[in-house]
Image (cartoon, rainbow, N blue to C red):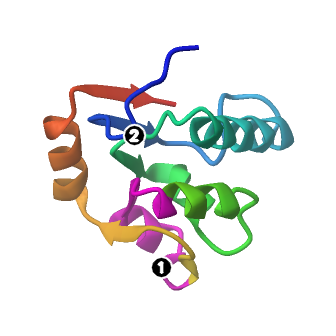
Amino acid sequence: MLNPPVDSNTVILITHNGMGSADKELQLKLIGTYLRLLLENNYLPAVICLYTEGVKLAVEGSPVLDQLRALEENNVRLILCSTCLNYFGLIDQIRVGITGGMNDIIEAQWRASKVITI
């Protein structure tokens, strides 16, 4: 396996409360594995943007909080959509990341050399 750049200019967009469109348990298992492998393999994006149901991964009770915290500790910026958090009534339950607006998400995408949507 090649050594990927730690300080990449990649943005990952997470738009679901999990990964894929299978049963919820499988979706959460997949996103947990994905985030863990990003860390283990040093595939660290510059930014992860969470919006729509993706914001649910960064709030109290999420099974992937440890992985998201570890990514943040490794200088991955986590941007949570404030409109989405408010829509779902989750603004007071944030446990990782920063609250941002659509301008923050657009800026991250625009500055990126690669954008991955999962």
Q: Is residue 113 left or right of residue 10?
A: left
Q: Secondary structure at mark 1?
A: helix
| Residue, disc 1 | 91
Residue name at image x 22 percent, y 46 percent:
108
Percent x, y of residue 11 = 34, 38
Q: Are marks 2 and 1 in contact (CB under 8 Å)?
A: no
Q: Which mark is residue 45?
A: 2
Image position of 101 with respect to 26: above or below: below
Q: Is residue 102 left or right of residue 70?
A: left
| Viewer-proximal residue among 24 and 105 | 105
Q: How many marks?
A: 2
Closer to the N terminus: mark 2 or mark 1?
2
Where's the N terminus, which quadrant?
top right
Residue 49 sits inside the magenta stretch: no
Within-10-Å neighbours for mark 1: few <14, some 14–19, many 20+: some
Between disc 2 and disc 1, the foreground one is: 2
Residue name at image x 26 percent, y 35 percent:
9
Residue name at image x 66 percent, y 28 percent:
20
Percent x, y of residue 117 = 43, 30
Q: Secondary structure at mark 2?
A: loop
Q: How far, Cα to Cα, is label 2 from label 1?
A: 25 Å
Please report the bounds of the magenta region as a residue range: 72-92
Q: What's the amino acid at mark 1?
A: Ile
